[in-house]
Amino acid sequence: MSYSTEEKNAIYRVIRERRDMRHFNQKPVDAEILYKLIQAAQQAPSVGYMQPWRFIRISDYDIRMHIYEMVKAEIAETAEHVGSKREAYMNLKLEGLRECAEVWVAALMEGRDEYVLGRRTMPEMDLASLSCAIQNVWLTARAEGIGVGWVSFFHPDELADLLNMPEGSYPAAVLCIGNVDAFYSEPLLKTEGWDNERNLDEILFENTWGQNCDL
Ligand SMILES: Cc1cc2nc3c(=O)[nH]c(=O)nc-3n(C[C@H](O)[C@H](O)[C@H](O)COP(=O)(O)O)c2cc1C
């Protein structure tokens, strides 16, 4: 069954207007909405129906601040690796961990080696599946007027230790979730001059790599 024009336009709009947010106000997020977010994660596709995603809601202030310190340290460390873009990098805002209402850690479960369906040659499909779940959270949040920021500046081992995660599990993302005063109208990294969107001819080929495809 197809959807009405209005419904389709809502989907296209939410995809277009989803943003990675790093500015939040302190207003709490309704429990009802949080439940919708985790439901959306659960409804994501996954390799071999593996559902490898786990989410840890960080409600403890000290743990949140510990995560913030880890992220801050890694953001500083990364400055030593960005080469000539160092000055531009120093002006970027790359997380909103202290301001956002909610912090969730998105992780891969332990014991993933047992799952071979679609992963025998590509074990990383578990991470691809988790990413689908995160994208579902992101889009659902946007539809509800809630901002999400994906933070990946941390050492996974350190974060796993902090959260008492079992051997073999893997924390892949720290998600800042919260109310915002306004959504950015374009990616913040674009506004801040870090990079621009790719043209279609750079990302779409026909038959063989690099071959132009006219759509
Ligand atoms: C896997 C992944 C990791 C990311 N990690 C970070 C991060 O650590 N800090 C940050 O500010 N943004 C992070 N982002 C957000 C991107 O910077 C953002 O998606 C991109 O600039 C495009 O902006 P938009 O999401 O608003 O369209 C991440 C996004 C993805 C998909």
Image: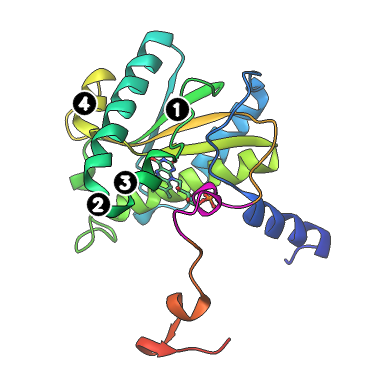
> Which residue bears the numbered disc 2?
83
Question: Gap in Å between the C-alphas at discs 1 and 3?
Answer: 29 Å
Q: Nearer the viewer, mark 4 or mark 3?
A: 3
Q: Nearer the viewer, mark 4 or mark 2?
A: 2
Q: Earlier in the sequence, mark 4 or mark 1?
A: 1
The chief SS type of the magenta part is loop
The C terminus sits in image quarter? bottom right
The N terminus sits in image quarter? bottom right
> Which residue bears the numbered disc 3?
86
Q: Residues within 10 Å of mark 1 (few under 14, many from 20)?
A: some
- Indicate the position of residue 140 as horizontal and vertical percent values: 62, 42
Q: Residue at x 44, y 53 (%)?
A: 194
Q: Is residue 191 magenta?
A: yes
Q: Earlier in the sequence, mark 1 or mark 2?
A: 2
> Which residue bears the numbered disc 4?
158
Q: Report the span colored magenta.
A: 186-195
Q: Residue at x 71, y 56 (%)?
A: 13
Label 1–label 2 contact, CB within 8 A: no
Name the disc covering residue 104, or none. 1
Q: Amino acid at mark 1?
A: Trp
Question: Gap in Å between the C-alphas at discs 4 and 3?
Answer: 26 Å
Q: Amino acid at mark 4?
A: Glu
Label 3–label 2 contact, CB within 8 A: yes
Secondary element under disc 3, as helix, strand or loop, is helix
Q: Amino acid at mark 2?
A: Gly
Secondary element under disc 1, as helix, strand or loop, is strand
Name the disc covering residue 204, or none. none
